[in-house]
Image (cartoon, grey):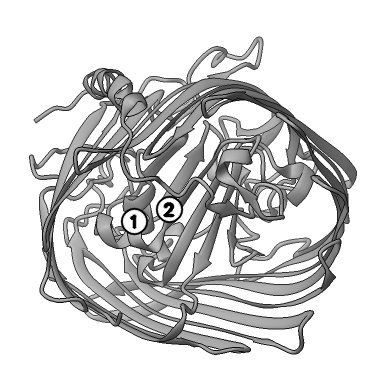
């Protein structure tokens, strides 16, 4: 069954008038986000586009991975190389994975070698909440935040003693288990969560060594994946004004893929994220926080043949970070935040890099003010990079409340991204003379928030200079430019017992390098259109839901000669509450067995089923 993007767009357009007129149970409009400004601010008061997905929504969606959870949401597009655990790239508003900053509990993650975060290895069972900020935030976070920021918060403690358990079985011999507990007392709290996942997977790639296509090998077998993870968090109030907390996430995976003796066909990967934070709040007018963190991204590749495992290569990177931030409330509705960040990246590999470490120090200041119906946010930051010197970025945002829940916003910001170690020093395909990418973006939006409903519309344009691209010899160079224009529409309503969440995105990502053969072509692997519709309904202890996603066509190469067709999928889910603590969930994904590719020659799963038994103490 084909579900074209235009069909879904029409459905969203027809649904929005009903969404705007519904007046049922209130949504959490006072939900607070911290990623957009590095301070708490309600969603309705943010001057930049933000979105929040909490644990209740995660459980309800029955998503099997972080990509499943985020697919089709406003401004987000994913490409995946062959199913669970395989390399997954994120595009936010047309910006590449290396141009989107990903944080886990405030700690910056991503391989320093390639610049890409291993999203496929972050277990969804360990996630409490996801905050999505669309648009440049380099003025607060420095390099990489050109397209936006995604912050993942791991599971923390609720009130009192709580336990949870989930057991899942499904297609392709999928087996999953997770369990955890948390306890929050008067002064301290602790939580621990363990998870395990294993699947036989699908044949990842339709490659051909003879035709030199795809993964360049003929290996038509199942490519499995397994992941074992542990998340521990805890904190303690040392007094009325001082508190300390720590966290650790460790996710170890084994991933099979189609490859050769030179590049391997199996990898052991490990993601470790850990850190600590000290908070001091002597009064309402001042707060100080100090945070340290580390992200280890380790990857060992092997070639497996006839049961024999031979070592191929190691790519290990480490990111150490530290930050300090002071927040001053100097008048009613007037706040000034100042701070500094330090970061050191290091690469350890069997591949020799001429330079394998560098550090960066950034200082920033941010003002947030409210004047009746008007709100203002302004920030500026300077980064001193060991390799690239000083780089200054800034942003300015304005909001106007019009009454009846309506709000206008406008924002502009600059961003930059330092070249990765692979760009600069990888043998035979690097360019040490590369300069950082630079961007300028503007966004205008209108939103309306009511009791049990809301909708938002945002339009934007981004221009990226010194874009790093590859020439015919796969050597990176700095000549390219890009211009990305787009619009996003979201709507939510609780109407007649139905929870309806609709999202649609249009992106026009163009190569704007005048004189180049690829001028005015689409940037590779970006779809211009996408949408998502979630509908859920409860009937006493029974709850049913459907998720429909649609994505337009894309091109797999810069020349726009290899076209990948658009596609649509439909997922069905049902949940039955056995009692207050136990529930049974069932999900059918891609129920019409749609065949599609997001990367040429790499397969995606067809129809799949899964069954989950879940326990959560009340």
Residue 427 lies in what quarter of the image?
Answer: bottom right
Look at the numbered disc 2 and give the secondary structure of its residue: strand
**Residue at point 29%, 62% (across, down):** 59
Quick check: marks 1 and 2 in contact, CB under 8 Å? yes
**Residue at point 57%, 19% (across, down):** 511
Q: In this view, does 525 lie above or below 27?
A: above
**Residue at point 57%, 13% (across, down):** 519
Residue 257 lies in what quarter of the image?
Answer: bottom left
**Residue at point 64%, 55% (across, down):** 34
Position of the N terminus by quadrant:
top left
List x then y, in percent, for residue 41. 65, 49
Q: Distance between the residues labelled 1 and 2?
A: 6 Å
Q: Looking at the image, can residue 289 be seen?
A: yes
In this image, 377 relative to 536: left or right? right
Q: Which of 547 and 541 is in front in this view?
A: 541
Q: Looking at the image, can residue 553 be seen?
A: no
Which disc is residue 57 wearing? 1
Which disc is residue 222 wearing? none
Give the residue pinned by disc 2: 53
Q: Which of 251 and 298 is in front in this view?
A: 251
In this image, 206 relative to 511: left or right? left
List x then y, in percent, for residue 24. 31, 40
List x then y, in percent, for residue 430. 68, 46
Q: Residues within 10 Å of mark 1 (few under 14, many from 20)?
A: some
Q: Is residue 316 above or below residue 69?
A: below
Position of the C terminus by quadrant:
bottom left
Q: In this view, does 243 lie above or below 312?
A: below
């Amino acid at each position: 069954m084909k579900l074209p993007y235009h069909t879904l767009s029409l459905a969203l357009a027809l649904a929005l008038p009903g969404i705007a007129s519904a007046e049922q149970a209130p949504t959490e409009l006072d939900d607070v986000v911290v990623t957009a400004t590095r301070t708490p601010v309600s969603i309705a008061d943010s001057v930049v586009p933000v979105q929040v997905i909490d644990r209740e929504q995660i459980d309800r969606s029955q998503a099997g991975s972080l990509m499943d959870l985020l697919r089709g949401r406003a401004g987000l597009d994913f490409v995946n190389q062959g199913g669970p655990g395989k390399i997954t790239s994120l595009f936010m508003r047309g910006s590449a994975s290396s141009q989107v900053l990903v944080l886990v509990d405030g700690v910056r993650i991503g391989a320093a070698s390639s610049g890409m975060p291993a999203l496929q290895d972050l277990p969804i069972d360990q996630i409490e909440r996801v905050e999505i900020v669309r648009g440049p935030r380099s003025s607060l976070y420095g390099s990489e935040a050109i397209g936006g920021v995604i912050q993942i918060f791991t599971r923390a403690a609720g009130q009192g003693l709580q336990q949870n358990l989930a057991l899942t079985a499904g297609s392709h011999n999928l087996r999953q288990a997770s369990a955890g507990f948390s306890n929050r007392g008067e002064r301290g709290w602790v939580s621990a969560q363990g998870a395990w996942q294993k699947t036989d997977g699908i044949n990842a790639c339709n490659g051909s060594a003879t035709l030199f296509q795809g993964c360049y090998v003929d290996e038509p077998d199942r490519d499995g994946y397994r992941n074992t993870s542990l998340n521990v968090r805890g904190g303690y109030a040392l007094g009325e004004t001082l508190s300390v907390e720590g966290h650790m996430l460790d996710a170890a995976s084994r991933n099979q893929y189609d490859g050769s003796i030179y590049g391997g066909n199996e990898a052991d990967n490990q993601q470790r994220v850990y850190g600590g934070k000290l908070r001091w709040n002597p009064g309402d007018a001042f707060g100080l926080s100090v945070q340290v963190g580390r992200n280890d991204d380790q990857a060992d590749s092997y070639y497996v043949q006839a049961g024999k495992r031979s070592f191929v290569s190691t790519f290990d990177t480490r990111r150490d970070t530290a930050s300090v931030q002071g927040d001053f409330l100097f008048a009613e509705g007037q706040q000034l935040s100042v701070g500094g960040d330090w970061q050191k990246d290091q690469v350890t590999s069997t591949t020799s890099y001429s330079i394998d470490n560098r550090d960066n120090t950034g200082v920033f200041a941010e003002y947030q003010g409210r004047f009746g119906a008007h709100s203002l946010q302004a920030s500026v930051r300077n980064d001193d990079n060991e390799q690239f010197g000083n780089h200054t970025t800034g942003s300015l945002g304005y909001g106007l409340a019009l009454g009846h829940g309506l709000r206008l916003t406008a924002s502009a910001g600059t961003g930059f991204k330092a070249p990765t170690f692979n760009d600069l020093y990888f043998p035979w395909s690097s360019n040490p003379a590369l300069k950082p990418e630079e961007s300028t973006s503007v966004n205008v939006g209108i939103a309306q928030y009511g009791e049990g409903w809301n909708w938002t519309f945002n339009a934007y344009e981004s221009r990226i200079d010194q874009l790093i691209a590859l020439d015919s010899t796969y050597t990176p160079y700095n000549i390219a430019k890009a211009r990305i224009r787009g619009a996003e529409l979201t709507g939510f309503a609780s109407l007649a017992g139905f929870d309806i969440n609709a999202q649609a995105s249009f992106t026009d990502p163009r190569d704007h390098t005048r004189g180049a053969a690829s001028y005015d072509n689409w940037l590779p692997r970006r779809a211009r259109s996408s949408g998502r519709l979630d509908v859920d309904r409860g009937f006493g202890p029974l709850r049913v839901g459907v998720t429909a996603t649609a994505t337009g066509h894309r091109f797999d190469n810069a020349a726009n000669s290899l076209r990948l067709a658009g596609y649509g999928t439909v997922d069905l889910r049902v949940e039955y509450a056995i009692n207050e603590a136990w529930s049974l969930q069932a999900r059918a994904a891609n129920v019409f067995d749609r065949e599609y590719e997001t990367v040429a020659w790499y397969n995606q799963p067809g129809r799949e089923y899964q069954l989950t038994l879940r326990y959560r103490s009340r």
